[in-house]
Structure formats: structure tokens, C-alpha cells
Image (spheres, rainbow, N blue to C red):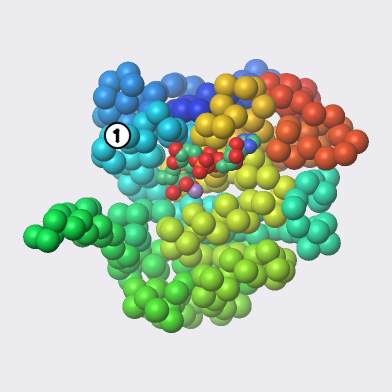
Amino acid sequence: MSKKILVVAGDGIGPEIVAEAMKVLQALQADGSIDVSIEDALIGGAAYDAVGDPLPAETLEAAKASDAVLLGAVGGPKWEPLHISKRPEKGLLGMRAGLGLFANLRPAILYPQLADASTLKADVVSGLDIMIVRELTGGIYFGQPRGVETLPSGERKGVNTLVYTESEVERICRVAFDIAMKRGKKVCSVDKANVLECTEMWREVAVKTAADYPEIDLSHMYVDNAAMQLVRAPKQFDVMVTTNMFGDILSDCAAMLTGSIGMLPSASLNADGQGMYEPIHGSAPDIAGKGVANPLATILSVAMMLRYSLDAPAAADRIEKAVSQVLDQGLRTADIMSEGMRQVGTAEMGDAVVAALS
Ligand code: NAD
Ligand code: IPM
Ligand code: MN
């Protein structure tokens, strides 16, 4: 049965990298490996410019009616002066909340060909395979009260609030434990339980939930130490589970272990297995429009989509193998370039992946 994909390219390099991911999807469609129907919609700054809203109602409706959403990236300096409710990032957050995408999976895997692309020593990162499970619809991103108010003194006060309920913590821990059961069975829950009551509760719920997973080796780490350990000895981690904001920060850090932020895909899932798929990086305004962005994180996000939402694991494998093959051929975008390799642009990289599929 044909599956529906909604494509929201967004801003900056978003349309450039999504165009390459679309080539891959279309190639798989053309050779009969997948059966999908694809629709486009507006999100982010592009949507604001067109209709005055970073998440038009019809985009969210179309997303709800789809099996999966493929997103490029949103945001950019052009929209920074807008009120926060109209900013491109609000469109992305609205999509996550509107679809209930509470589980964000961010795999940091080092392709062996890129051991020299990382700023860390090759032996620190070689063989790296970490899954960061980030809670995505709660925490300080969504907690109330929030905002900026002017005090009687005339001074302004800014407030954001870290909020989690036990059930929110339990369900994200279950996702992490279920994933860990299919890999190294080790989960590190990252918190700041020494300072923040909310994450002290997080730790208690993690421990309680782990009782249903006797085979899981659960450990806990404060987020400051976790950031340090990720660059000191990243291979100690198998699955990491953490809050919305800690996961945002730690995954950018983990991305650099793989050579570049342009390599890290993600899946954001709800309780029904519906998902949104996007690279973890942003709209990269500094390189937008130049045709040099790395499209591999977006192409690898398509592989995650095929595996998690479209029940096409063989096609997902083919994409991942094709990416590996292209790296074997020595092709590199600027962000992963190293000596002796051949530098290519966004489109050439996408074309090479498509060629390697067959
Ligand atoms: P960014 O991830 O866009 O860029 C950080 C650095 O990484 C830049 O130097 C950029 O050139 C580089 N980079 C990112 N993706 C790359 C790729 N595919 N290939 C090569 N280099 C790449 O982060 P930022 O600069 O902090 O944010 C820029 C804008 O993107 C902001 O408006 C921010 O809110 C938004 N943002 C959006 C998302 C998203 O849509 N999911 C994620 C992060 C940031
Ligand atoms: C990400 C981004 C987003 C986040 C922003 C753009 C809202 O940084 O997807 O990692 O903070 O979640
Ligand atoms: Mn981020």
C-alpha cells in the first residue's frame, strides 16, 4: 500500500539538502523498492514569508495525514527580529508538539572512512556507535510559566521552566530501554539531579522503569560530566537518554565525533510510530545558497524514515550502504574534507549516492 510522505524543506540549506534526499527517494520509487506518494508544504521562515505563520494549519493537517514527514531545516537571521511566536523555530516546535513526537532518536555513528575528519583523534572515535534518545515534547522547551515581564522597578524578568511529569519520563526511558535491548543493553541517563529537583525525579523514574528491564545496565551521569566524557572517551556510551535541552546540546557535541554535524540524521516518533525525519543541524545560513552543504545527514534521515515509519528496512540498508560506498570512493563535501579526498558540492554528493544505490 502506498505510504504518504510530507516534505517540508524550510529555510537556508533546507531546500538544497532536501533536494538531494528527494533524488534518493525518487530513485527507490522508480526501481520499485518503495511505494510512496510525496507532497510538499511550507514551514519556518518560508511559511512566514508566504502566509505570515511559521506553521500554517494546512501544513500541520497534512503532516497528521501522512505516514512520515521529511524536514530540512528552519530559521535564519532574516527572521530573528520577529516575535518568538512567529519565528521559524516555532514552526518546528509546533510540528513536534502537534504530532506528539516525544521520542527523538539521534544516532552518532562514525563511518570508518571519516575517522580523520573528526577533530578528535581517530582512535578516540573509531568504531563509535551511540544512540542519543532525546525527550522532545517536554522539559524547559515547553514548560510553563515562561516569558519576559517588566517588574514594577522597570527591570525585566525572563522565565523558562523545566517541567516533567513521571509519565513523560517513563515513556522516554522505555523507548531508550527498548532500543538498548536490541544493541549493547547499556543505558546512561543524563541529568542534573544534584541541582534540579525535576531531574532528581527523572533519575528516580528511570530507576523504577528499569525494573521491567532486568538485562539493562542503567547508569546515571550529570550532564556536565556527560559533555566531558563524550569528548574524552565517547565509546563508553551505548544508549544515552536525556531531557529535551540536554539532548539538544549533547547531540551537537556527539555530531562532531562523527566528523561533522552534516552527518547526523534523526527520527522523531510519536506513540503511533508516525515520525518526522530531519538532520540534527540547522539551516546553516553561513553556507546557504552556495551548493556546498553536506546532504548526507538528510539522506540518512530518509533511511531512518524507511526503517521506522515506512516498513522498508531493505531500502534503508541500501541507502546506508550507498553512503558508505560514496565515502569509499573518496567523495567529500567541504565539512568532511581531508587530504587526498575529492571535494564535491551538495548536488554531486546526492547524485553519487543515487548512483551507488544500483
Ligand atoms: P547550524 O546547525 O545551522 O550551523 C552550525 C554550523 O554547522 C555552521 O557553521 C554551518 O555551516 C555548519 N553546518 C550545519 N549543517 C551543515 C551541513 N549539512 N553541511 C555542512 N556544514 C553544516 O546551527 P546555527 O548556526 O546555530 O543555527 C542556524 C539557524 O538554524 C538558526 O536559525 C537556528 O535556530 C536554526 N536551527 C534549526 C534546526 C532545525 O531546523 N532542526 C536545528 C538547529 C538550528
Ligand atoms: C534541533 C534544533 C531545534 C531544537 C531548534 C531549531 C528549535 O536545535 O532540532 O536540534 O532546539 O530542538
Ligand atoms: Mn539543536
Q: Residue 160, can we see it?
A: yes
The residue tagged with tag 1: helix, strand or loop?
Answer: loop
Please, is residue 321 above or below residue 20 in the view? below
Q: Nearer the viewer, residue 13 or 34?
A: 13
Q: Any atom of ligand 1 within 8 Å of the CB at mark 1?
A: no
**Residue at point 43%, 58% (across, down):** 245
In the rendered image, the residue lying farthest to the left is 152
Closer to the camera in the image, 102 or 242: 242
The residue at 78%/37% (across/down) is 337
Question: 316 or 266: which is nearer to us?
Answer: 266
The quadrant of the picture showing ligand 1 is top right
Q: Is residue 312 left or right of residue 348?
A: left
In the rendered image, the quadrant that contains the C terminus is top right
| Circle 1 Cα neighbour tier, 10 Å, few/some/many (<14 / 14–19 / ≥20) | few
The structure residue drawn at horizontal position 32% and vertical position 34%, both measured from the top left corner, is 81
* Residue 316 falls in image quadrant: top right
Locate residue 174, reporting x and y percent: 47, 66
User: What is the x, y in percent for residue 147?
Assistant: 22, 53
Can you give x and y, in whole percent of width and height, for residue 123 in the image?
Answer: 83, 62
Left or right of residue 196: residue 296: right
- Residue type beneath disc 1: Leu
140, above or below 325, in the image: below
Residue 136 at x, y percent in the picture:
41, 54
317 versus 122 height, above or below: above
Q: Can the viewer see residue 310 in this picture? A: no
The residue that label 1 is drawn on is 82
Q: Quadrant of residue 251?
A: bottom right
